[in-house]
Amino acid sequence: MRRRLLALVCVSASLLSGCGLVPGGGTERRTVTVWLMQHSASQEYLDRFTEEFEREHSGLDLDIRVQEWTGIGEKVQNALEEDAADGPDVIEVGNTQVATYAEGDGLLDLTLESMRDWGREEWLPGLAEPGRWGSQQYGIPWYAANRVVIYRKDLFREAGVTAPPKTHDEWLALTEKLHTGGNQGIYLAGQDWYTLAGFIWEEGGELATERDGVWRGALDSPAALRGMDFYRRLQALGDGPVDADEEHPPQAGVFAEGKVAQIVAVPGLASAILKQNPDLEDELGYFPVPGRTAGRPGAVFTGGSDLVVPANTDTEEGAIEVVAALTGARWNTELARTMNYVPNKAGLADSAAGEE
């Protein structure tokens, strides 16, 4: 609450000294620095948002800085502990990371705004709950995204594949058929734990189990081992590195090079692929990750991002305005349409209707 008290002091002082004003009586423009993660939103979306936000908020300028996920935890922690003038005022964080930052008193408590203005009770529980620490809301849900298979329609046609697979066995057989003639049937890095988690859950396993308040790893269970074995068999039908994750090298770049038939990723990664290879625009398709049986799609890891405001921001009101706009119905709907995401409220789900 330190910044809110300072804001009140500033308002009071302005009556005597012109705090927050520039000579001539004009309102001082403030810059809101926003850290967003790579591939979370297209540049076209960010450009449109910036232009309209600044037009609607005449006293604010936006400085959006795109960050990489690798090493972001330490970078955010440093930003929360420092009082640098050019530090971030709004940060996109993985929804599971909020508690780590809130525990150290590094985030602004946004409970009041979320309940009074932003419709907290309507948010997707899987995004809203990880954004809380105790009873306070620190992380504001921005979007959710689950894993799908992004595939090359032309390579499927060339291999005589006319329909996407619906079971694990069909998927293996199809991928083996695609893995020929210099093409990779699938590009799957050996340490993509997001994809592995879904396979383990599909087999009935868990990553860890809790008993009497104690968590223990469960990766040695028969079900988890079955999930790992399926991962191993699928991963072998491509040239993904066994000792690296999906960002080393970035799988979007590998797929864009044109020799990969499939990847498992969030749908929004398609924009990164097309940025590197626009010729693929009409050749990208999507289908659900297959399950063990044809009755329903396979289990997948659903991730998402929250927006947080550092407690050490010196532009609190502006930061809150940015969060309100990005997570509000208008721009959240636009983000879902642009990036093929799940919006932050179930009531906005129709915004993605009809999208493959």
Image: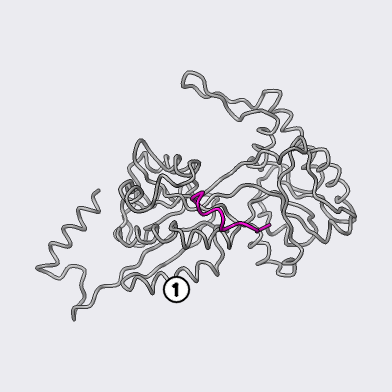
Which residue lies under the disc numbered 1? Answer: 51
Picture quadrant of residue 237 = top right
Query: Which residue: 47% across, 68% down?
Result: 49
Query: Which residue: 35% across, 52% down?
Result: 310
Question: x and y percent of residue 197 in the render?
Answer: 64, 37
Question: x and y percent of residue 97 in the render?
Answer: 47, 43
Question: x and y percent of residue 1 in the render?
Answer: 25, 48
Q: Residue furthest left?
A: 16
Out of 310 and 51, give the one closest to the viewer: 51
Q: Is residue 154 magenta?
A: no
Query: Which residue: 50% across, 67% down?
Result: 46
**Does 221 appear above or below 156?**
above
**SS label for mark 1:** helix
Q: Amino acid at mark 1?
A: Glu
Disc 1: CA contacts within 10 A as few (<14), some (14-19) or many (>=20):
few
**Does 336 appear above or below 228?**
below
Magenta highlight range: 344-356
Question: x and y percent of residue 133 in the render?
Answer: 38, 38
